[in-house]
C-alpha cells in the first residue's frame, strides 16, 4: 500500500512539501518502513532525536474500545511514527461503530510531558471545510449564489475585471487564479534554505494581520492562472475573501457565524477559533523545523493565526474532527444538495506541486481496495493534522502531530526522505484500510495540502 501523505509547508507558495514524499522515495529506495513489535504501554520509546534533542516519550494509548478497530496494530503504528522522530502523535479511528484513540510520545520536549489523545490542536486547512460549509448554508438561504461574481458582493475588496470574472465557486475550489499570500506576508521564507528564513515566523508570532491587507498581497502578486481555468491552484487567499463574504452577507463576524451555525450544528465540544495567540485547554507544544535550516526546532504553540484566518486558524481535537466530517457527510451540517456541490471535484495543483482532486472545501482521496475518502489535511507552524472519512461513513481517521517540515532539503531544494515519512504512511495505511491483508494500491495518493 502506498498512501502518499503530503502535509506541506504553511509557507504555501514555497512549493515544497513538508512531510511524506512517498514510499518510492523512502531511504535508500526502500519500501515503507515496518516497525516490529509494540512497546509496553507507558514504557519509554527511546532512540528518537528531533533537531539534536533526544526524545524519550511514552506509548500512552487511550483506547475507548479494548477490542477496537485493530487497536494493537494502530498503537504499534503510532509508536513507529514517534520512534521515527516525531515528538508526539495522537489519533482517533472509528470503524463500524467502534472507536479507538491512541497517543505516543511527548507534548513537551523540555519536560517530557506525554501527549494525550484528547488534546486540542491547531488543525490548519481543515478550517477550509468549516468555511465552505458556512458558505453553503448561506447558498441554501439564497444570500449567496455560487456562480455569482465576487464583485457583486465585495466590489471594493476584489475590484475591476477580477471582481467581475471570479465567482464564489472559484474561490471555494481554488480556480480563481488568485495566488497565495503567505510568501509575501512572511518574506524571509523566500530565502530558504538560509537559516534566516525563519525570521518572519519569529517576527510575526504576535502580529495581528487584517484580512484586507493579506488579500491585497495576494491580489497584487502575479496571477496563478485564469479565473475558471481547467486546473486550479491552491490558495489561502481565496478563503480569506470567503470569510469577508460571510461577514458581508450575515452581518456577523466570521468566527461567530461558524461557531453558531457550523461548530454547534455538528455538536462539537472542543472546537473553536482562539481569541488570541494562545490555545485554551490541554494541548501540545508545536515544533517547527523549517526543513532543518535552524539548529533546533522553534516552538510555536503560541501564535496569532490571523495570517490565515478562515483558511487555517481553527483549533480542534481528533474526536471532534471525526464527529464533524461524519455529520457533514451524513447531511447534518449542510443539505444533501449542498454536499453534492461540495463533492464536485476537479484537479487542483497543491502546495507541493502535485495535483489533487478538490471540491468546495473537501478533498477526495481514492484508496484502492479500501474505498473513497473525503476530508482535508492541515498544517500550521509546528502542527500537522489529517482527517478523512470514508464515503459510506463506516470508517473515519483523524491524526495530529506536533512537528512540521522535518525533512532536510537537498541541493535542488526538495525535501529529503525521512523515517517519519514511511512511518506515517504505515499509520495511515492501517487506519484507513483496517485489515492486515488490505489490497495494495497501485500508486501514490495525495490529499490536499497547506495551512
Image (cartoon, rainbow, N blue to C red):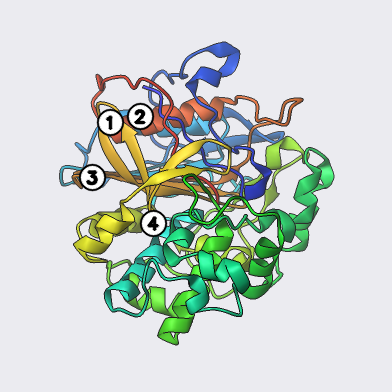
SS assignment at label 3: loop
Q: Mark 4 and mark 3 in contact (Cβ < 8 Å)?
A: no
Q: Using the image as rendered, state which of residue 227 and residue 122 is in the foreground.
A: 227
Q: Which mark is residue 391?
A: 3
Q: Gap in Å between the C-alphas at discs 2 and 3?
A: 17 Å
Q: Residues within 10 Å of mark 1 (few under 14, many from 20)?
A: some
Q: Pick whichever of labels 2 and 4 is earlier in the sequence.
A: 4
Q: Using the image as rendered, state which of residue 4 and residue 71 is in the foreground.
A: 4
Q: Which mark is residue 360?
A: 4
Compared across the picture, whether 450 is left or right of 448 comes to: right
Q: Mark 1 and mark 2 in contact (Cβ < 8 Å)?
A: yes
Q: Pick whichever of labels 1 and 3 is earlier in the sequence.
A: 3
Q: Residues within 10 Å of mark 2 (few under 14, many from 20)?
A: many
Q: Pick whichever of labels 3 and 4 is earlier in the sequence.
A: 4
Residue shown at 49% from the left, 44% from the top: 231
Which numbered disc, 2 or 3, marks the residue closer to the eye? 3
Residue shown at 72% from the left, 36% from the top: 292
Which numbered disc, 1 or 4, marks the residue closer to the eye? 4
Q: Is residue 111 visible to the viewer in this orientation of the structure?
A: yes
**Which residue corresponds to mark 2?**
429
Amino acid at each position: 500500500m502506498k498512501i502518499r501523505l503530503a502535509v506541506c509547508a504553511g509557507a504555501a507558495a514555497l512549493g515544497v512539501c513538508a512531510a511524506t514524499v512517498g514510499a518510492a522515495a523512502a531511504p535508500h529506495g526502500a519500501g515503507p518502513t515496518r516497525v516490529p513489535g509494540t512497546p509496553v504501554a507507558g514504557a519509554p520509546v527511546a532512540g528518537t532525536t528531533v533537531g539534536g534533542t533526544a526524545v524519550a516519550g511514552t506509548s500512552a494509548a487511550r483506547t475507548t474500545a479494548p477490542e477496537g478497530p485493530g487497536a494493537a496494530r494502530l498503537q504499534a503504528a503510532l509508536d513507529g511514527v514517534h520512534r521515527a522522530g516525531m515528538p508526539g502523535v495522537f489519533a482517533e479511528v472509528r470503524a463500524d461503530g467502534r472507536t479507538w484513540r491512541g497517543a505516543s510520545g511527548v507534548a513537551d520536549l523540555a519536560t517530557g510531558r506525554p501527549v494525550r489523545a484528547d488534546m486540542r490542536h491547531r488543525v490548519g486547512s481543515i478550517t477550509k471545510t468549516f468555511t465552505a460549509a458556512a458558505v453553503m448554508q448561506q447558498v441554501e438561504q439564497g444570500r449567496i449564489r455560487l456562480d455569482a461574481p465576487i464583485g457583486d458582493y465585495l466590489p471594493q475588496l476584489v475590484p475591476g475585471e477580477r471582481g467581475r470574472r471570479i465567482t464564489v465557486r472559484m474561490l471555494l475550489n481554488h480556480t480563481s487564479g488568485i495566488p497565495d499570500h503567505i510568501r509575501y506576508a512572511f518574506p524571509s521564507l523566500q530565502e530558504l534554505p538560509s537559516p534566516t528564513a525563519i525570521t518572519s515566523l519569529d517576527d510575526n508570532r504576535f502580529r495581528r494581520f487584517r484580512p484586507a491587507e493579506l488579500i491585497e498581497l495576494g491580489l497584487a502578486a502575479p496571477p496563478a492562472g485564469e479565473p475558471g481555468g481547467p486546473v486550479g491552484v491552491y490558495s489561502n487567499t481565496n478563503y480569506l475573501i470567503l470569510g469577508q463574504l460571510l461577514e458581508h452577507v450575515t452581518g456577523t463576524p466570521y468566527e461567530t457565524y461558524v461557531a453558531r451555525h457550523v461548530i454547534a450544528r455538528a455538536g462539537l465540544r472542543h472546537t473553536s477559533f482562539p481569541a488570541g495567540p494562545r490555545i485554551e485547554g490541554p494541548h501540545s507544544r508545536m515544533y517547527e523545523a523549517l526543513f532543518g535550516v535552524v539548529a533546533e526546532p522553534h516552538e510555536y504553540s503560541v501564535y496569532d493565526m490571523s495570517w490565515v484566518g478562515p483558511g487555517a486558524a481553527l483549533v480542534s481535537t481528533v474526536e471532534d474532527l471525526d464527529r464533524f466530517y461524519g455529520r457533514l457527510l451524513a447531511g447534518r451540517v449542510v443539505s444533501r444538495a449542498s454536499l453534492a456541490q461540495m463533492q464536485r471535484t476537479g484537479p487542483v495543483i497543491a502546495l507541493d506541486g502535485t495535483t489533487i482532486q478538490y471540491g468546495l472545501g473537501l478533498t477526495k482521496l481514492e484508496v484502492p481496495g479500501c474505498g473513497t475518502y473525503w476530508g482535508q489535511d492541515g498544517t500550521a507552524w509546528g502542527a500537522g493534522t489529517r482527517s478523512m472519512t470514508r464515503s459510506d461513513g463506516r470508517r473515519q481517521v483523524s491524526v495530529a502531530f506536533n512537528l512540521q517540515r522535518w525533512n532536510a532539503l537537498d541541493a535542488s531544494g526538495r525535501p529529503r526522505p525521512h523515517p517519519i515519512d514511511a512511518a506515517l504512511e504505515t499509520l495511515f495505511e492501517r487506519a484507513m484500510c483496517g485489515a492486515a491483508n488490505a489490497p495494495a494500491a497501485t500508486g501514490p495518493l495525495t490529499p490536499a495540502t497547506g495551512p
